[in-house]
Image (cartoon, rainbow, N blue to C red):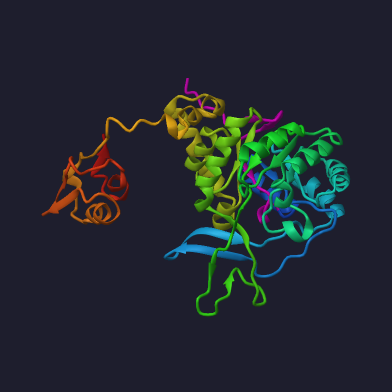
């Protein structure tokens, strides 16, 4: 018998057929979009953030960070939904699909009464869970919304508590990375009664400047503002935040931030996430990416002998230690282990010479490391395009 590992997960008491969810963003702007994505294989979706009064967007509202022609990051000044709550009642009906829960993202100002009002209306639409958007970075000061709440632990607790006392479905609190202490905000959400945590929302940023005009990007009508940065470039931040949450609490976590493949999804799972949410990768490559992601995840599990996602959820946390635990002796050095693969490009020589300890020489494609000079920083191993060196 050939065993095929299951991708299904239980997240805060709600069953999902697979861990890949659409995050609250343009790809979930209405029920038709959500339904189409789920039919293509997504495990569930978080609606675009619902408001008591719909928003209006400026145009254009996206800026990009590129390495050559390749996009590596995106900044947005996108607002929340432009649809009314009455309209969303119909959109949720359209979106609902058996086996694919719908999570209603909600956002309002810092008045708990408004959160209670919004909670009751959105729960009645038939969503399976609520996600509290207390983390959007570019709507906060003027409207007393988003990260203005998520950067205040007392407000997080107060609003979470009021929502929990007025609904009967699981409540997720979506945290911002734009704080000094993720553990403090995690504890605040748990104290308020949160059933789960999602993280991260976008990183407050200025994506770039048009040097010909001096106008920052993205710009609309000759003006710009700080926006929310997303894409592969935020993944190291997101992984750190998810790991810190997992180290702080046993609440289930939905990991967000730079998920762009089944491999990066596994990274989030290994630092403690139960589900992962995706936005930017969909905006760049479409809903269909999930088909290969599910195949890749299942193949990985078969190869490693995992029967369920739970078997490797949080696996990496045991290897995270405070810096004081690290030993400086004995020193570990770089070694040339695949000399035949060296093409003589000299990248390692330049990197080590100008950015490290000048321990590498190259003569006629014969690379050598001076063991007496090498400090073991690992720079050469990582810049070498031919994998000629290893540490040890």
Q: How many marks?
A: 0
- Tell me the residue at 76%/32% (across/down): 193
Residue 97, can we see it?
Answer: no
Residue 170 location, quadrant:
top right
- Whether 20 is among the magenta residues is yes
The residue depicted at 53 percent of the width and 74 percent of the height is 210
In the image shown, does 177 or 256 lie closer to the viewer?
177
Q: Nearer the viewer, residue 354 or 207?
A: 354
Q: Residue placed at 53% from the left, 41% from the top?
A: 239
Outermost residue toward the top in this view: 1
Range covered by the magenta-colored residues: 1-28
Residue 346 seen = yes
What is the residue that sits farthest to the bottom in this orientation? 213
Frontmost residue, 332 versus 306: 332
State the image coordinates of residue 328 (x, y, percent, origin top left): 33, 33
Q: Quadrant of the C terminus?
A: top left
Q: Quadrant of residue 387?
A: top left
Image spot of residue 223 (x, y percent): 65, 74
- Give how far across and how far down residue 268 sits, in percent: 53, 38
Give the answer, above or below, for where 18 lies relative to 106. Answer: above
* Residue at image point 54% right, 34% down: 269
Report the residue that reaches farthest toward the left: 364
Left or right: 376 in relation to 116: left
Magenta region includes residue 211: no
């Amino acid at each position: 018998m050939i065993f095929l590992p299951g991708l299904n997960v239980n997240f805060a008491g709600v069953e999902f057929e697979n861990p890949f969810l659409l995050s609250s963003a343009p790809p979930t702007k209405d029920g038709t979009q959500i339904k189409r994505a789920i039919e293509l294989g997504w495990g569930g979706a978080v609606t675009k953030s619902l408001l008591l009064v719909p928003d209006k967007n400026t145009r254009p509202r996206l800026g990009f960070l590129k390495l050559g022609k390749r996009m590596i990051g995106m900044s947005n000044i996108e607002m929340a939904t432009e649809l009314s709550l009455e309209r969303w009642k119909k959109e949720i009906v359209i979106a609902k699909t058996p086996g694919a829960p719908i999570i209603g993202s909600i956002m309002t100002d810092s008045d708990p009464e408004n959160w209670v009002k919004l909670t009751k209306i959105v729960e009645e639409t038939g969503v399976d869970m609520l996600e509290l958007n207390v983390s959007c970075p570019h709507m906060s000061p003027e409207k007393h919304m988003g990260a203005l709440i998520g950067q205040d632990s007392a407000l997080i607790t107060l609003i979470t508590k009021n929502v929990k006392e007025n609904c009967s479905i699981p409540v997720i609190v979506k945290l911002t990375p734009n704080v000094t202490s993720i553990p403090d905000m995690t504890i605040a959400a748990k104290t308020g009664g949160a059933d789960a945590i999602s993280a991260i929302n976008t990183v407050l940023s200025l994506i770039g400047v048009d040097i010909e005009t001096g106008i920052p990007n993205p710009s609309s009508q000759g003006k710009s503002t700080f926006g929310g940065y997303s894409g592969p470039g935020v993944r190291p931040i997101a992984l750190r935040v998810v790991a810190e949450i997992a180290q702080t609490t046993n609440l289930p976590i939905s990991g967000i931030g730079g998920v762009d493949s089944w491999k990066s999804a596994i990274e989030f799972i290994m630092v403690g996430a139960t589900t992962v949410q995706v936005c930017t990768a969909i905006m760049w490559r479409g809903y269909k990416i999930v088909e290969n992601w599910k195949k890749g995840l299942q193949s990985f599990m078969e190869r490693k002998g995992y029967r369920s996602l739970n078997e490797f959820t949080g696996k990496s946390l045991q290897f995270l230690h405070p810096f004081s635990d690290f030993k400086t002796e004995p020193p570990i050095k770089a070694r040339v282990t695949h000399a035949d693969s060296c093409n003589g490009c000299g990248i390692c020589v330049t990197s080590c010479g100008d950015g490290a300890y000048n321990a590498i020489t190259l003569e006629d494609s014969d690379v050598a490391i001076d063991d007496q000079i090498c400090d073991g920083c690992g720079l050469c191993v990582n810049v070498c395009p031919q994998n000629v060196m290893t540490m040890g």
